[in-house]
Amino acid sequence: MELKSVCRMLLFPVQILYYVLRATFQSLLPSRRKDLSREVVLITGGGRGIGRHLAAEFAKQGARKVILWGRTEKCLKETAEEISLSGTECHYFLCDVANREEVYKQAKVVREKVGDVTILVNNAAVVHGKSLMDSDDDALLKSQHINTMGQFWTTKAFLPRMLELQHGHVVCINSILSQSPIPGAIDYCTSKASSLAFMESLTLGLLDCPGVSCTTVLPFHTNTEMFQGMRVRFPQLFPPLKPEVVAQRTVEAVRSNRAFLYLPWTMHALVILKSFMPQVALEEIHKFSGSYTCMNTFKGRT
């Protein structure tokens, strides 16, 4: 083996330690926050739930324009009117992100009528809350098409222009269930795991692209209409997140160019434990926490 290669191998652990320490130190310092006054933000699933709060938070923190995509015009219109009343220009368009042709068509309309999108927030998602054998085939496909493939189509529609401008941000509202699945939501957990892999790959792929960043948000159970009826065994220990808190922390993460955000921070411990604990221990934790039965009372919006 060449001397140069040996030196590189010996230096590699030192480099890793250096970058870990540097990242830790930088996280303790106040970061420079991105100015949103020139940003045009597009939010999929922007008519209700976390999407609605994201629209309000981006507007509150100074975004120039907010664009809402969704499938229910009533919700989109109400949210757009609310944002407009706050003084921020807001537009909405009917668009099903599962439909590739519709995404590309509406993306062209957005560029012509509103302008270039500089922050894309992939928030649209569905959950059916059933076991594999109880799930309808079409429902399973719908989850994958909206929760996962929709991100492919929206990102392909808007990322090229961001790269041309050397200015842009792709955001994904994911879920901690992508890394710690539960029974009874197999469609959602699988699609979110695929979505996380998509964002991890995209984040690495954009490292050499100046001015374009990614943020992936992985929240715990959030108190929205979509997960209505989901029961947590120890709500005092693991209270559901408020959607407005998720929105606020997401916008802050975008402004500070944070790549991954776990909510609450204790979810880091869950991921670390899962990486080394034996399967038997993990199963007992699931039984103790009640995650095996938490979807038994599920009655949320699909």
Image (spheres, rainbow, N blue to C red):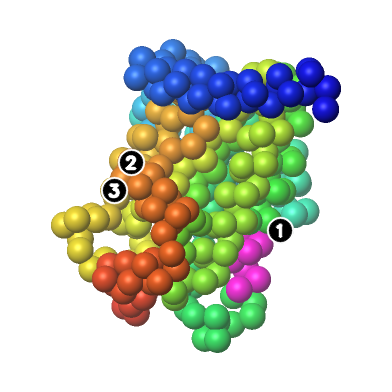
Query: Which three-letter amino acid code belongs to the residue tagged 1?
Result: Asn
The mark lying in front, picked from 3 and 2, is: 2
Q: Position of residue 159 (x, y in %)?
A: 71, 33
Q: Tell me the number on the disc at residue 265.
A: 2
The mark lying in front, picked from 2 and 1, is: 2
Residue designated by label 3: 242
Residue designated by label 1: 99
Mark 2 or mark 1: whose residue is earlier in sequence: 1
Mark 1 or mark 3: whose residue is earlier in sequence: 1
**Residue 103 forms part of the magenta stretch:** no
* Crowdedness near tag 3: few (<14), some (14–19) or many (≥20) residues, C-alpha within 10 Å: some
Which structural element holds mark 3? Answer: loop
Q: Residue at x 71, y 58 (%)?
A: 99
Q: Which residue is drawn at 67% across and 38% down?
A: 202
Residue numbers of the magenta segment = 140-146
Which structural element holds mark 2? Answer: loop
Q: Residue at x 40, y 18 (%)?
A: 25
- Give the spatial CA distance, label 1 vs label 3: 30 Å
Decide whether the magenta segment is chiefly helix, strand or loop. Answer: helix
Which structural element holds mark 1? Answer: loop
Q: Can see residue 40? A: no
**Residue 142 forms part of the magenta stretch:** yes
Q: How many labels does the image show?
A: 3
